[in-house]
Image (cartoon, rainbow, N blue to C red):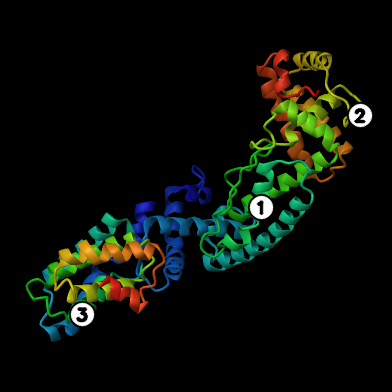
Amino acid sequence: MDNDFSLEMSATRDVIARELQGCNALTARFGLTLTEQEVKTLAVAHENALRDTGRIAFGGSILKKLAETFCDSPFITREAWADTLAELQDDFYYFKNDSDDRLSDDELIETMKRVFDGPAQGSLDYLSGTSLPELCRRAREDFDPTNAAVTRELF
Amino acid sequence: MENEKLLVPEGEWTAEEQLALQKKLLPLLAHRTALYAAGDTSARVETVRELLASITFTLDVGLMGAPRKTLLTTDLDALFERGGHVIDQKVEAGRLLWNAACLTAPKLESRSLQETLQSFSLFWKRYDARFFAHVFPCDIDYPLLRPVPETLLGVEYMNEYLRRVLTENAVLAAFDPERTMLLLDADSPLWRDAPANLAAPVLANAVGLAMLMKKDLRVRKLSNDDLTVLSAQLAVLTDEKATETLRLAAETVCNMANIRDAASRTYLADSASDMLLRLRRVPVEGWRGTFPEME
C-alpha cells in the first residue's frame, strides 16, 4: 500500500514531460531547450531522485521550477542543460531532506541559484559540497534564510 | 503501515475493497499533504505516512462506531470534517478529565504519577489535531493497573488513560493514605521514585479481604493464614469460577469505595481478574508479591 501511494501521488512521467516541454518556450530565449528524449530521461530521473531520497511529489515535479530559475544562468550550455537539470534535481531533493524540510522549495532553489551563479561559478560540485551543507545545517538550527546579514556571511 | 491496519482490518476486506478505499483516500491524502507542505511540491515518505495515519484516525473517529465499510460509500471529505469536529470535542473533554485527575490525585508522593500528569499539561499546546491527530505528544511514565490498548491513538489514548487514572484515584481515595503508604512500602520501598502503580497493592488487599468476606476492607491486613484460606478457596475453583470470584470481590470493593459508573467497575473487575494468572503460577508462599505484607 505504501508503494502504491508513492507512485500514485507522484506526478506521472507524462505530466512531467508536458511540464518540461512547456518550459522550452521560456528557456529557449536563453538558448536552452530539451529534446523529447531528454525530457523522457529527466522524467525517469525524477522518479529515481524521489525514490533515492525517500520523498513523494504531489504537486508536479521540481524540474519545472529548476528549469525556470536556472535557465538564465551564464554558466549553463545547451549541451549540459539536461544533465545539469538532473543533477540540480538530485541536489534539490537531497538538501530538502538535509534541511529537515525547513527550507521551502523557493528558498532552497533561490539559494542554489545564488551560489551557482556566485561563488560556485557554475560548479555543481562546489554547490553541493560547500554552501548547501552549511545552509542546511543552519536551517536545522532555525536560521532564517531571509536574514540578509547571515546569508552574506554564508555566501 | 500500522494505521492502515486499523482502518482496513485484515481478513474483513477483499483485495478489491482495499484497492477501492485506497483510490478513494488518495485525493484526500494529496490535499492534506499539499496543505501540510504549504506550497512545497514534495514531502518525505515518512511524513506522508504520518499524514495518512492522521487521516485514517480522523475518519475512524468520524465514523462514530459505524461499520468501516461505510467508507466505501460515504463522502470522505465530509466524514473527515466530522471526524475533526469530534476530535475537537474530545480534546476539550480531555481538559476536563485532566483537571479532574489532577484534583483527585492521591496525596502520595509518587514522582511518576506527578510527572506524568504534569507532562499532560503540554498536550493542548503540542497536539496537532489537523495533521497529526493520531499522535500523543506527551510522556507517560506512570503505569496503570491495566495499560490503555495500543489501538487507541492521539486524544483518544489520552482520554482513556485519564479515565483509568480517575478510577484508580477513586479507589485510593477510599483508603487511608497512611495505610496505603504502608502497603506501598511493603510492595516496593522505591515506589516514590520508581514508576510503580499505586492502586495495585491497595486493590489486591481489598479484593483478598472481600473474598474472605471481611467486613472492613479499608483497615484490615491480610495475614499469612488469610492467604492460606484464599489459596484453598481458589484451588478448588476452575479458572472461570475463580475469575468470577475475583470479579465479584472487585464489585464489593467498588461498592465500598462508592464507585458507581459501569466503565470503572468493569476496569477494576478486569484488574482483579488479572491477578488470577499470578496467583495460579506462584505457590501461596510467594503471594506476598501480590498481597504485600504490611508492617
Query: What residue do we see at 65% from left, 62% from top?
Result: B86
- Give the residue pinned by disc 1: B118
Q: Residues within 10 Å of mark 1 (few under 14, many from 20)?
A: some
Q: Amino acid at mark 1?
A: Gln
Q: Nearer the viewer, residue A23 or B257?
A: B257
Question: Could you tell whether B109 is left or right of A11 in the image?
Answer: right
- Give the residue pinned by disc 3: A23
Question: How far is the residue under mark 2 from the one under mark 1?
Answer: 35 Å
Please state the chain letter of the residue tagged with numbered disc 3 in the rendered image: A
Residue lying farthest right?
B215
Q: Nearer the viewer, residue B246 or B27?
A: B246
Residue lying farthest left?
A79
Q: Amino acid at mark 3?
A: Cys
Query: Residue B295: x and y, percent?
Result: 81, 23
Mark 1 secondary-structure assignment: helix
- Give the residue pinned by disc 2: B216
Q: Same chain for the residues at labels 2 and 3, yes or no?
A: no
Q: Amino acid at mark 2?
A: Asp
Marks 1 and 3: which is nearer the front? 1
